[in-house]
Amino acid sequence: MLSIRPRGKNSILYIRGQVSLGDKRIDVKEFSSGTCDADAASHLMAEYETKLRHQLMFGPAAAVAQGVMADAFDSYLSKARPPGASDVLRMGKLNAIIGDHALREPKQAWDHFRRAYLTGHDPAGQDRYRSVFQAAINVHHELHDLPPIKIKAIPFSNERNRYLTKEERDRLIGSYVGHVQPIITMLAFHGPRVQTALQIQWGVNGVDMAREAIRLNHSKNEVIQSVPMHRRVKDVLLPIWEDRGRPAKGHVFLNKHGQPYQDTRLAPIPGGNPLKRAHATALGRADVEDFTVHDWRHHWASHCVMAGIDLITIMHMGGWKSLRMVQRYASVGIEHMREAIDKLS
């Protein structure tokens, strides 16, 4: 059984002991009740003992049956590999709206959150909340040896694949301001995500001019891939490297003030693109429409396919985690082959 004893000069009451049921037993390490009021401490002790007896009687499911969504969210935020900043914000919004909902009814809680907050959000954004919510529940379930749950995915189209002709590519690259052109050249010929490029460093773990290689830290999928440097990229980076005294460390790309670009993934409110304004200006100069900064990644992958590079190689070079994520580009190869066939007389 559990017992109460005072500790310290303020006589705060602490609880400790064991709870038994048949041959099963849970040892309770001493913990503070947070009060010196004997009635309040006794009430807390009785509630805690009842909870542990339920756990002995019904197994791990008892912890979930008695818990609330906030317990699962806390487990997710405390896991060994912490979530990214964007998902932490999503978790905060989930907790504010459904944190007090019963953990044993996750689908009802999810339906309430969708109605309360996600009405009007685009399907892709809704599905990201669903994914984070499901992951939090399953992390908590795993801690209690319970099977995972499945929340039905929200269908959305993620098949955008915009790319330029080579003439449009070169015209657009030339339309950026001088300090941005080298960044865009890397995006066009190596296909990294924007922040992967902006945060790349000189040296063997980034731009290795001595070996003419680039090591891309695709942090979104935790993939680090070293690839040979494209000659066009070498042509724009070599003068920068030499002008700075051939550094072996430090950011490769600097903004117009000579400072490294902010890593918006680490901002209090993640998101935003430091190149957005320069990109919009360049689009107008080059007379190119419907082409985002991220579309340079689609452009690179599409032209890799048209050059005959297989999807597995593209997946590894581009830092995608699965082949499914690059299969959208397969249709580009088919269209390219059709154009080639049509040229035959």
Image (cartoon, rainbow, N blue to C red):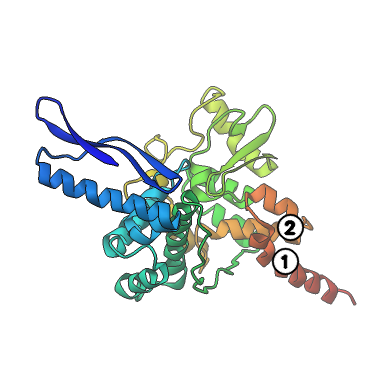
Q: Residue furthest right?
A: 345
Which of the pair 203/242 is nearer the observer?
203
Residue 192 in the image: x percent, y percent? Answer: 58, 49
* Residue found 17% across the figure and 45% down from its top: 42
The residue that mark 1 highlights is: 330
Image quarter hosting the C terminus: bottom right
**Percent coordinates x, y for residue 253 in the rendering:** 49, 38
Mark 1 and mark 2 in contact? Answer it, CB < 8 Å: yes
- Which of marks 2 and 1 precedes in the sequence? 2
Residue extending furthest toward the front: 22
Left or right side of 340 for 319: left
The three-letter amino acid code for the residue at tag 2 is: Leu
Label of residue 311 in the image: 2
Q: Amino acid at mark 1?
A: Ala
Q: What kind of element bears circle 2?
A: helix
Q: Is there any visible trace of residue 153 in the rendered image?
A: yes
Height in image: 267 above or below 251? below
User: What residue is shown at x 32% (from left), y 53% (from top)?
Assistant: 51
Q: Is residue 262 visible?
A: no
- Mark 1 residue crowding within 10 angstroms, few (<14) / some (14–19) / many (20+): some
Tag 1, which secondary structure? helix
Percent of width and height locating residue 52: 35, 50
293 with respect to 259 (left or right): right
Q: Is residue 143 above or below residue 237?
A: below
Q: In the picture shown, does residue 162 fall above or below 261? A: below
